[in-house]
Image (cartoon, helix red, strand yellow):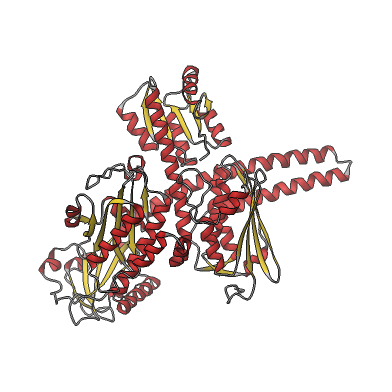
Amino acid sequence: MRPTPWILVVDDDPGILELVQDLLRPNYLVDTANNVKEAQARLQNGAYDLVLTDMVMPEIAGMELVKYVRLHYPDIPVIVFTGYANFQDAVTAVKLGAFDYLPKPIQTEILRHAIHRALEFRRLSLMQRDLEFIYQGAEALGFQALDLLSETPEAAMLGRLREVGSRGESLKEIGDAFLNAAYEIFRATQSSIFMFDPNQNMFTGLAARGPDAEARLAASVPVTGGIMGYVVTQRRPLLVADIDLDQRFSLSGRRFSYQSGSFMIIPLAGSRFWGVINLTDREDRQPFSARDLFLGWLLGMLFVEIMERRETRPTVEPQPFLGPLIKEHIPLGVALVDQDLTIIQNNMALERLLGVKGKHLAGKKFTSILGLASSDQEALEASFQKLLDDREPKDLPPLKSSQGNKGHRFLGIKMIPSLQQGNGSQTIVMVEDVSEIEQLRQRLHLYEHLAIMGKLSLCVAHELNNPLDGIRRYLSLAQMKKNDPGEVDRYLGEAIKGLHKMSLTIRSLLSSANPLKAPRATDSLLNLLQDAVKIMMFQASDQRVQVEFHPPGELRNLTVEGDLYHVFINIIKNALQAMPQGGKLCISGFINDKKVEIDFEDSGPGLSSHELSQIFQPFYSTKEGVQGLGLGLPICRKILERYGGQLTVQSQPGQGTTVKILLPKSGIGGSFGTP
């Protein structure tokens, strides 16, 4: 966000527009519009931080503007106000995506407070998006990310923690050691570690500090709900700077009382999910920062490393399988199979699910009774074989089943090793009909995709309109100058350039018809660069940044690891953040016998010599507030070092910035090759 936020006010009453302008102009840049159509035109030509709109206007109501902004500019919050306030309208506005709803007459302090909250919410949302790009690169580095903290007190403390557990400490002592370290690093006065119990599907307390520590240790928290449950599904470190402004958790209650609305939750995920570390209530009551979250992520990685180093398989007492409860009353289909996937026992629910009630399934091959396609049978057998090898539970994605007159269904299948001692070759398989859930998931995926395509189509229509108008003008000029061959050639040449630009735009639409996927483990350098550009095009379009993409075609012949994708993403993201009100980004490069060079040149404000000297220092950022973590470029440089590559930055104030990636073409241990 720019230092002075830019607000668009929409109302058909000139008096209201003048009043709001007078209230806001000392602290904000303010534009106005008299109706929804004028507001849409302004949004297409300006990068606003907030929209204030009246609900009742002639021709098109303010609700339509709320829906338009939500679809096309989802990062811009909208505040709705009206003189006909009622509860139902407020609920409708919030459901459509409005951040807040204010009644008229407008009260100065209430309006200023609402604007402050909305802009803070936008800032925090942008910070979350920025963090996601950073952590993609950090995950690619793994424990090498610890090198970014070298010669700092935090690095020394984390280094000492790596030795915890090697001296025979109990699990509780390990937890206490980590929370003590967390206090020294973050000054978090309330903290806890909850371990995941897969048998009960619950979190149980391992260690806690601060008030209510004993109550938190004694608590058992269901894994399916609450904010910790959200972290389980996302498997990403979570930073909430202010829970009152975070719409993801507006309805989530907090089990214990806290002094601050800011907290962090770090998932402990390795070969399996271990639990979470919770940190809240800093001593200074300030919100946790992006730097804190990065350190918390490293803390969690160390805890997982220790847990997996000390893991031993517990001895399980023999338990009877398929007792009367499971056989007769459990609605989930359950079977016990041997090492060849032959059914030993099954319950009645499995017979009902498969439509073979009263028939004996024992002795039959499990994969043969499900009506799966051969490819799905092979996938199930491969997962089963992996379970036999590592003795870890497997949860398969929904598999399509075709069983005669039952039509097509989707089956969810889970497999866990048998709990009976001495039966290591036996496996428990659970089957349920998830057709309705899968259909809803596919429908949601389709709707999300249609929304993306709608926005993309609008962008494409906008992009096609300008070159099409130019082509029409050049052809008209060529007709007028038909007696001057030189001029005709020049005008036709310009028209061909316009057609080429339209062709590139249409190809971009076609290539985006499938949702973007995460980069493969290895891919061509050109594919990774193209994917990074595609995924950032929406942000570039929203900011009115023109992207020129001219990479050397020979990059398609060079195969690299997928981690370079994160380098490209971070560099493009930094360039776009330097041009919030529009500009140009040129991506080009060259290749010769010795090296590959990829250049990213932006038309932003540039960097001073002092800023240039600091940009590779961890946690140094030129961005306002906590949005900038200051790890993007250090992570990029660290990844490039794996290839013997370099990252250089050239910039001067007022003259933009050029970032160069230099990679050796040969002599780097086979990291490059021809596919």
Q: Nearer the viewer, residue 667 or 15?
A: 667
Classify 291 as above or below 364.
Answer: above
Is 464 in front, or is 355?
464
Count of picture labels: 0
Residue 582 falls in which quadrant of the image?
top right
Q: Position of residue 140 (x, y in %)?
A: 47, 64
Q: Residue at x 31, y 47 (%)?
A: 283
Whether residue 86 is visible here, answered yes or no, is yes
Q: Residue furthest left?
A: 324
Residue 290: where, in percent of width, then height? 42, 51
Q: Residue at 23%, 51% (x, y): give it.
A: 210
Return the x and y of residue 394 as percentages of the image width and height.
31, 70
In terms of image quadrants, where is residue 317? bottom left
User: Would residue 438 be visible to someone looking at this image?
Assistant: no
Q: Give left or right: position of 494 versus 289.
A: right
> Which quadrant is home to the C terminus?
bottom right
Q: Residue at x 60, y 67 (%)?
A: 645
The percent position of residue 142, horizontal first and vertical second, equals: 44, 66
Residue furthest to the top in view is 15
**Residue nearest the observer in this picture, 397 or 393:** 393
